């Protein structure tokens, strides 16, 4: 009798397990059907920091404008500065850039002390917004991230004015709050973009529980979510990416690896990093991709553009569906003082990202070939 009872009990357990597995599969299928899907892939091209001058530092502006004209024959206006960036965005359906600094004119609260040597205040001229929009054709979507440590360089009012100028130019703005920016694509699909920075006044990249929650909310509604992060230490000594909280100028500047994990756990498809002002590793998370820092892209401002901070890249990838990326590549850039973008014949950024990815993520780091194409690295035995 005990044998028969045990047999029936086992049958009941197996049946219950099978029912439970079937229910789990049905729930997963239901979620998959409810998650919005792309009707067709799109090509994303993303860059790091972009600054098109600053009218908060008149002395620098005069010297830089003189050098631009004498050495390069360029005017110190945004449309002139951005001409060299256009070829790097060819083929994009969506362009995502980090707008490093406020946009506007007129009086502004003073950010930096008179004797400061490590404080920079950036406010770009009003036509910076329209110049960014004119980088690509009207059928290409442009998104500007303002979740960074320079969006309030002209105060809270200056940040609001920056948003207004960008939106008036036809640029979608992300990073202003915890609500994902809904970005309609020309053929009818809608994706979501979220920007995070290490600041309690914006979506805080250090609050990983909140990061995951905000991304999950966007993924449930839109399916495909792009996340941009402005965090980490800065400068030539900040090229390595580690799973630790980073510190810069005694400030806690977030854990880039933990941030990416939280964003992907919430359902993000790609994570685009900037803030360190240098190139960092890229990592595959299955068929999803994170660039930990794309460096300085076009920074006409009082930056010290010396190796390796003069190197950057535009990262382009095809987003096939939610949580699936393919055909990724890096398009290397280089700058010379005071922020003139030139073609990098040495393709230094591809070498940097390939070597840093191997060092920091031996199993999952991206492999970058000499043409800039990203592949998956074979795990070491």
Image (spheres, rainbow, N blue to C red):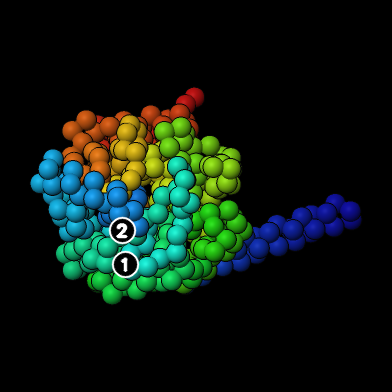
Considering depth in this image, is 226 or 188 the residue closer to the camera? 226
Residue 260 in percent (x, y) is at: 50, 49
Q: Is residue 125 visible?
A: yes
In this rendering, would 80 be left or right of 226? left
CA neighbours of label 2 inside 10 A, class few (<14), some (14 to 19), many (20+)? some
Lower position in the chain sequence, tag 2 or tag 1: 2
Secondary structure type for disc 2: loop
Q: Return the x and y of residue 112 as percentages of the image width and height.
A: 46, 53
**Figure quadrant of residue 131:** bottom left
**Alpha carbon of mark 2 to alpha carbon of mark 1: how far?**
7 Å
At x 57% / y 46%, what residue is drawn? 251
Left or right of residue 326, residue 68 in this image: left
Q: Are marks 2 and 1 in contact (CB under 8 Å)?
A: yes
The part of the image, by quadrant, that contains residue 82 is bottom left
Residue 97 can be seen in this image: no
Furthest residue toward right: 1
User: Which residue is tagged 1?
Assistant: 105
Q: Which residue is mark 2?
A: 55
Q: Quadrant of residue 103?
A: bottom left
- Farthest left residue? 73
Residue 122 place in picture, x, y as percent: 36, 55
Relative to 243, does residue 209 appear above or below in the rendering?
below
Using the image, determine if residue 230 lies above or below residue 210: above
| Residue 328 or residue 197, whichever sits in front | 197
Which image quadrant: the N terminus? bottom right
- Give the residue drawn at x 34%, y 38%: 304
Query: Badge 1: few (under 14), some or many (20 or more) residues near its Cα, within 10 Å?
Result: some
- Badge 1 marks a residue whose secondary structure is loop
Q: In the picture shown, does residue 133 fall above or below 353?
A: below
Indicate the position of residue 176 as horizontal and vertical percent values.
45, 67
Outermost residue, front direction?
114
């Amino acid at each position: 009798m005990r044998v028969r009872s045990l047999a029936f009990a086992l049958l009941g357990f197996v049946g219950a397990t099978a029912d439970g597995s079937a229910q789990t599969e049905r729930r997963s299928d239901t979620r998959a059907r409810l998650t919005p899907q792309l009707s067709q892939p799109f090509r994303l091209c993303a860059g790091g920091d972009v600054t098109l001058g600053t009218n908060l530092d008149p002395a620098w502006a005069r010297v830089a404008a003189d050098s631009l004209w004498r050495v390069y024959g360029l005017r110190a206006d945004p449309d002139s500065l951005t001409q060299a960036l256009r070829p790097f965005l060819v083929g994009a359906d969506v362009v995502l850039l980090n707008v490093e600094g406020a946009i506007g004119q007129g009086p502004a609260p003073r950010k930096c002390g008179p004797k400061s040597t490590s404080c920079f205040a950036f406010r770009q001229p009003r036509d910076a917004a329209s110049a960014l929009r004119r980088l690509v054709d009207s059928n290409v979507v442009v998104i500007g991230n303002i979740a960074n440590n320079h969006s309030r360089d002209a105060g809270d009012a200056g940040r609001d004015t920056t948003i207004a100028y960008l939106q008036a130019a036809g640029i979608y703005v992300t990073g202003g709050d915890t609500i994902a920016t809904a970005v309609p694509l020309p053929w009818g699909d809608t994706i979501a973009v979220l920007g995070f920075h290490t600041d309690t006044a914006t979506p805080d990249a250090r609050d990983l529980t909140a990061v995951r929650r905000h991304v999950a909310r966007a993924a449930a509604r839109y399916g495909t979510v792009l996340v941009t992060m402005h965090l980490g230490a800065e400068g030539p000594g900040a090229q390595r990416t580690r799973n630790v909280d980073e510190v810069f100028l005694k400030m806690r500047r977030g854990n880039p690896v933990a941030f990416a994990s939280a964003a992907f756990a919430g359902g993000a498809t790609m994570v685009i990093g900037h803030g360190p002002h240098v190139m960092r590793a890229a990592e595959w998370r299955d068929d999803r991709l994170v660039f930990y820092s794309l460096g300085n892209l076009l920074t006409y401002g009082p930056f010290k553009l010396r190796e390796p901070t003069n190197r950057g890249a535009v990262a382009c990838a095809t987003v096939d569906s939610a949580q699936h990326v393919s055909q990724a590549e890096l398009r290397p850039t280089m700058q010379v003082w005071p922020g003139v973008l030139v073609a990098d014949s040495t393709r230094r950024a591809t070498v940097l990202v390939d070597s840093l990815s191997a060092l920091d993520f031996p199993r999952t780091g991206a492999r970058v070939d000499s043409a800039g194409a990203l592949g998956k690295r074979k795990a070491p035995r």
